[in-house]
Amino acid sequence: MIRRKWGNMAMSSKFKKCWVGVMDGGYARFYRYERANRKLILLYERDVEALQNLAEKMAEPSAGRVFDRFGQGRHVVERRNMAEEKIERKFVKDLIDELEKAAGQGKFEHLALIAAPRALGYVREYMGDSLKDTIIGEFPLDLVHVPLKDLEEQVDDLLNP
């Protein structure tokens, strides 16, 4: 579900010091949105690659096997790797801490978040009230690997419906 929260704000004030975050559970880029020329200026990016080595070390042993209900077959029981989830959560938590610090320093007044649905759920879980007050839109979309030119068009469409 797409959430927009700018209600009665004047169009000019809506985009003063506006940041756009594009992220999933392992990669994030943050941009300054310049509405006048509809451009995104990259501020910084983060990835979880450094934590991936830790995930491999923490990975669960191979999954168990179960018998089929019918016949003699056996198959692997699939389950989500808990180490991967912990790393995604830590990555998102660290990003939220950075954003709360930046908001407290006045680096941005408004924030639009475009995140893969699971990552957006983690963001909502960790976000404090002061950061929530800066959110002008939450978009459950995975646009992390979209080229900049296409991303600028998408962001423009999302922020200026």
Image (cartoon, grey):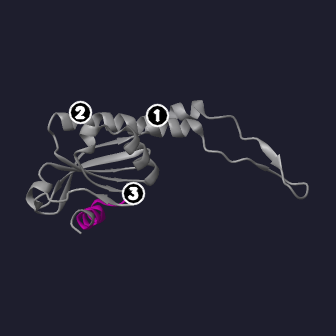
Residue 9 image position (x, y, % from top left): 13, 57
Amino acid type at image mark 3: Pro
The mark nearer the N terminus, 3 or 1, is 1
Query: Is 8 contained in the magenta span?
Result: no
Q: Earlier in the sequence, mark 2 or mark 1?
A: 1
**2 vs 1, front mark:** 2
Q: In the displayed structure, would residue 149 be above or below residue 25?
A: below
Quadrant for residue 114, please give it.
Answer: bottom left
Q: Which residue is mark 1?
A: 51
- Residue 150 located within the stretch drawn in magenta: yes
Q: Marks 3 and 1, Cα distance to the nearest angstrom?
A: 24 Å
Q: What residue is shown with label 2?
A: 101
Magenta-colored span: 145-157
| Numbered-mark total | 3
* Dominant SS type (magenta): helix
- Does the CB distance between marks 2 and 3 fall below 8 Å? no
Q: Secondary structure at mark 1?
A: helix
